[in-house]
Image (tube, rainbow, N blue to C red):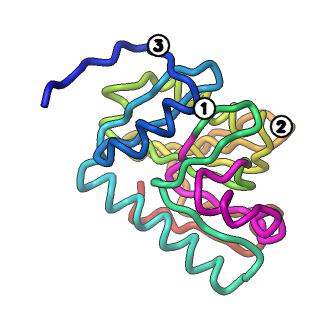
Amino acid sequence: METITIPRGFRVTPEQFEQLAQAEQLARMELTKDGELIIMSPTGGTAGRKNSRLTQQLRNWADRDGTGEVFDSSTVFVLPNGARRSPDASWIKLERWNQLTQAQQDGFPPLAPDFVIELISPSDLKNQRYEDLQAKMQEYLDNGVQLGWLIEPDTKTVEIYRSGQQVEILNNPQTLSGEDVLPGFILDLSEIL
């Protein structure tokens, strides 16, 4: 099989994106609102383990709480601006999830999560600029996400994105609170940072 190199800024239609997503199972892909295709390399073991810990803690809380659904990093959401994004972990209020048809739930759900987590991995820093990840977090807010965390394990920092507020930066926090978006959720960062 011949391989191709996709240049940065390469544009595809939403239909082409869905065809690529079905055909290419090894790489994670996203599509910007402008049609730029972003191909992300698979994560390494350390990042995969940390991301699993994030999702596990969120899932455990959601099972006890019962007010929403949790999604892992392989889920692609169609944001209101048309972008196709897949946060490392996310949560959606149950009533919003249940408003989707079965076909929408089975495909790429056409909505922004209420809460997202992005965990910066070494491959993220190698292949994307940090500013791109910050812009992605702002895009989430612009499309309806209420709370988002951008976690950078190497520098032990967390950027907290809240709807209608300035970004808050925490240095070496031990825990993070889900605040009023996820009442009672506390993320233990001891195995993440």
The mark nearer the N terminus, 3 or 2, is 3
Local SS, label 1: helix
Q: Tell which of 24 and 142 is nearer to you.
A: 24
Image marks 1 and 2: residues in contact by CB distance under 8 Å: no
The residue wearing badge 2 is 165
Q: Nearer the observer, disc 1 or disc 2? A: 1
Q: Amino acid at mark 2?
A: Gln
Q: Amino acid at mark 1?
A: Lys
The residue wearing badge 3 is 9
Q: CA distance from mark 3 to mark 2?
A: 30 Å
Q: Tell which of 155 and 62 is nearer to you.
A: 62
The mark nearer the N terminus, 1 or 2, is 1
Residue visible at 39% across and 42% down in the picture: 28
Residue 80 falls left or right of residue 13: right
Q: Amino acid at mark 3?
A: Gly
Q: Does 99 appear in magenta?
A: yes
Q: Residue lying furthest right in this view?
A: 164
The residue wearing badge 1 is 136
Residue visible at 33% across and 52% down in the picture: 47
Residue 98 at x, y = what percent? 78, 69
| Residue count near mark 2 (Cα–Cα under 10 Å), binned few <14, some 14–19, many ≥20 | few
Q: CA distance from mark 3 to mark 1?
A: 15 Å
Residue 19 falls left or right of residue 5: right
Bounds of the magenta span? 85-110
Q: Does 90 appear in magenta?
A: yes
Q: Tell which of 161 and 62 is nearer to you.
A: 62
Task: Residue 14: name its quadrant.
Answer: top right
